[in-house]
Amino acid sequence: MQKYSFFVNNSIYNNSFTRFNALKMQVFHKVSELSVFQQELQKKGHSLGFVATMGALHEGHLTLLRRANQENEASIVSIFVNPTQFNNPEDLEKYPRRTDEDLALLEAEGATAVFMPSVEEMYGENVQSEDIDLIGLDKGMEGEFRPGHFDGVATVVKRLFEMIKPQKAYFGNKDFQQVLVVQHVAKVFQLPVEVIGCDTARYSSGLAMSSRNFRLSPQGMEEAAIIYREMSWAAKNYQDYNPSGLRAAIRQHFAASNLELEYIEFADARSMRIVEDWSQHQEVRTFIAAFCEGVRLIDNTKLFP
């Protein structure tokens, strides 16, 4: 596996942008190492597209990077497994880490730069989330079943935006609730970045691409496709049910599968309020979390319109 040179000494930047721009991809570990890169982009009037990841990259991440490359003169991807958004220490420990493979993929896709900060670089000695009012976007679904998760997301994304200073940032709609949280953070802190939610990348079975899929067996990958099938079924049949009845029907379908359903919810696509009456909402999405072979998977799709 190809190894990559990491820039850990600011003196390497004392010559010129051209010197390190000649490399196919730069890898930064510290905020201070980003300064010359940012200054040169600003001088040239080039926009910077940003993709935030926790590594273990897959086609979904690469789709975001391709869009960033298409819409900007430069792109940067962060790889940082953020401890404050894991309410389960075991889940944090088991999160897949594939640094060499990730860097090879990013270079092949033409990423301009990669930012790989340490926990200390991101948080210093105080590894905890900031107190950010998320106006209820963090309630229900992931907010309910992963206490503190969105506080960690909001904190780390705010800091990444402040450090990297992108003009556009791209997030997958598989984590739709997260996209709304990030858009809110950018707005409330008046950060000059456009947060763009992008369509979920899926396998032919409909299963959403996810870093957690690396932990599934081939059989598990097949069985997990029930998540997308049930969301599709809901979109076709919701008019025959009220929200409570539709939830119950989907629970019954999962009971006959090998997956353990954690939640099935219908939420307003703007406020994230749980839906109890279809007629009270203009845009609704279906949200599912389930365990397959002990691996927690989440997904969502549009229910209507």
Image: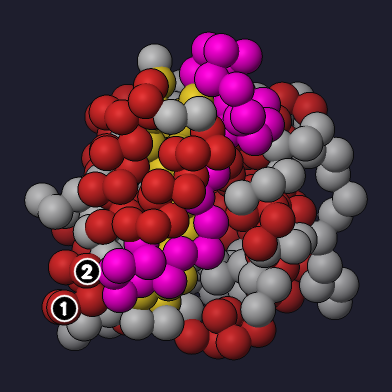
Please tell me whether residue 181 is drawn above or below residue 268 in the rendered image: below
Callout 1: 10 Å neighbours few (<14), some, many (20+)? few
Residue occupying image coordinates x 55% and y 38%: 244
Instruction: From the viewer's perspective, tell me whether residue 119 is left or right of residue 90.
Output: right
27 up-or-down from 177: above or below: below
Residue shown at 41% from the left, 76% from the top: 295
Question: Residue at position x 47%, y 79% from top?
Answer: 95
Spatial CA distance of label 1 from label 2 is 6 Å
In x, y percent, where is residue 174?
41, 46
The picture places residue 64, in percent across and down from the top left corner, at 33, 42
Tell me the residue that label 2 is attached to: 223
Q: Which mark is residue 161?
A: none
Check disc 1 and report its element: helix, strand or loop: helix
Q: Please, what secondary structure does the residue beneath circle 2 have?
A: helix
Eyeballing the image, is 76 above or below 54? above
Question: Residue 4, percent across and down?
Answer: 32, 76
- Measured from the top left, where is residue 216 in percent x and y? 27, 79
Residue 98 visible? The answer is no
Q: Are marks 1 and 2 in contact (CB under 8 Å)?
A: yes
The local crowd at label 2, few if under 14, some if 14 to 19, many if 20 or more residues have their Cα within 10 Å, is some
> Does the segment drawn in magenta span residue 280?
yes
Q: Say what amino acid the circle numbered 2 marks.
A: Glu
Provide the residue span drawn in magenta.
Answer: 254-283
Within the magenta stretch, is there residue 158?
Answer: no
Foreground residue, 76 or 45?
Answer: 76
The residue that label 1 is drawn on is 219
Displayed quadrant of residue 102: bottom left
From the image, which quarter does the C terminus lie in? top left
Viewer can see residue 189: yes
Instruction: Give left or right: position of 291 versus 167.
Output: left
